[in-house]
Image (cartoon, grey):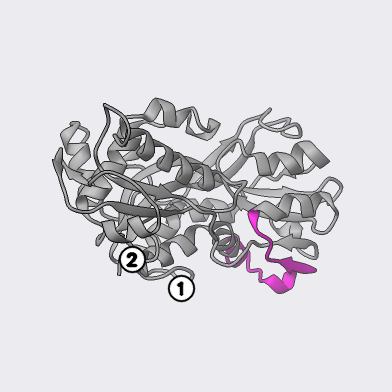
Amino acid sequence: MRKLIPTTALAAAALVGASLVAGGAAAQEKTFISIGTGGPTGVYFVVGNSVCRMVHKEAAEGRKKGRKHGIRCAAPSTGGSTYNIGQICAGELEFGVAQSDWQFHAVNGSSEKVTNCPGLRAVFSAHPEPFHLIAADGSGIESFTGAKGKRMNIGNPGSGQRGTTEVLMEGHGMSADDFAVATELTSSEQSQALCDGKIDAYGYTVGVPNSGVAVATDGCGAHIVNLNSDVEKKLVADNPYYAFATIPAGTYKTTAEDVTTFGVMATFVTHENVPEQVVYEVTRAVMENLDDFRSLHPAFANLDPAKMMMDGLSAPLHPGAEKYYKEKGLK
């Protein structure tokens, strides 16, 4: 059952808002939506909370101008991509942020690492997400296979970084047994663990720049490893959701030269059972306030609506999002 809360339940929870409207006509229910994000230091957390900020900015309650959509929004920290997709498909979340590769696999049922969810629907894409292999100063790690015999954080179960790390492990013919230790730290724990000497490296799929990465690079001299071997080239060639990416020189203190790696897109997804008008209002809130949205994180600086409705989206567009894009002549 979708978690769309009627007026009586909202009153009991002391949540206030105006009635949900369809194109300006009042509806009968107020609506609370939840957005799955990621670790509190990651860009997914910023994406989800930025969407909520735009939704609340648009709301007319208590003001003379605005949308009387009645939507209230929360974006808690979660386990990440595959967790968000699973919870959306279980009806526990209305929206979530997920890597483009896991969106693809969920819709197509092509990976056991993510819930098979043919009802998953795309709303828009956000920022590019290069995969970072971050190695401690003095670790000697200069390639993915260079992490063999080292203490490697492969990421917490349910996270996109865990899934992509496992894809790389498989491509290189490796398993967790090839590491001296394979930890399952979250994105908010891994950089400090590296600086404290508890791990030698970690993989992280994240937008650029990222404050968590800076803890390791700027804080204790860690470096980002080039990932452009034949394995990465094959992954990009064989999979439409991957592309090569560059982390520019100067992004972090130890990034003296451009780093070549591969990556995905961060995408904003929902389920076909979420009402069309709810998805329409959420899409509208972001797109009509895109300058404000861009200002909330450097990774959002180049967001372009024409690309956001296409890039990295392998699930069908939700009718609510499609309605908005058609109204604006984008589709």
Secondary structure of residue under mark 1: loop
Is 119 drawn above or below residue 101 in the view shown?
below
Residue 7: which disc? none
Of 53 and 248, nearer the camera is 53
Is 176 part of what is drawn in magenta? yes
Give the labeled residue for mark 2.
108
Name the residue at 74% across, 42% down. 215
In the picture, which quadrant includes the C terminus?
top left
Magenta stretch: give its range: 168-187
Q: Is residue 299 left or right of residue 156?
A: left
Amino acid bearing label 1: Glu
Q: Quadrant of residue 125?
A: top left
Residue 112: which disc? 1
In the picture, which quadrant includes the N terminus?
bottom left
Q: In this rendering, does residue 149 appear at all?
A: yes
Q: CA distance from mark 2 to mark 1?
A: 11 Å
Image location (x, y in percent) of residue 250: 68, 27
Image location (x, y in percent) of residue 60: 29, 34
Is 154 drawn above or below residue 75 in the view shown?
below
Which class describes the residues within 10 Å of circle 2: few (<14), some (14-19), or many (20+)? Answer: some
Is 49 part of what is drawn in magenta? no
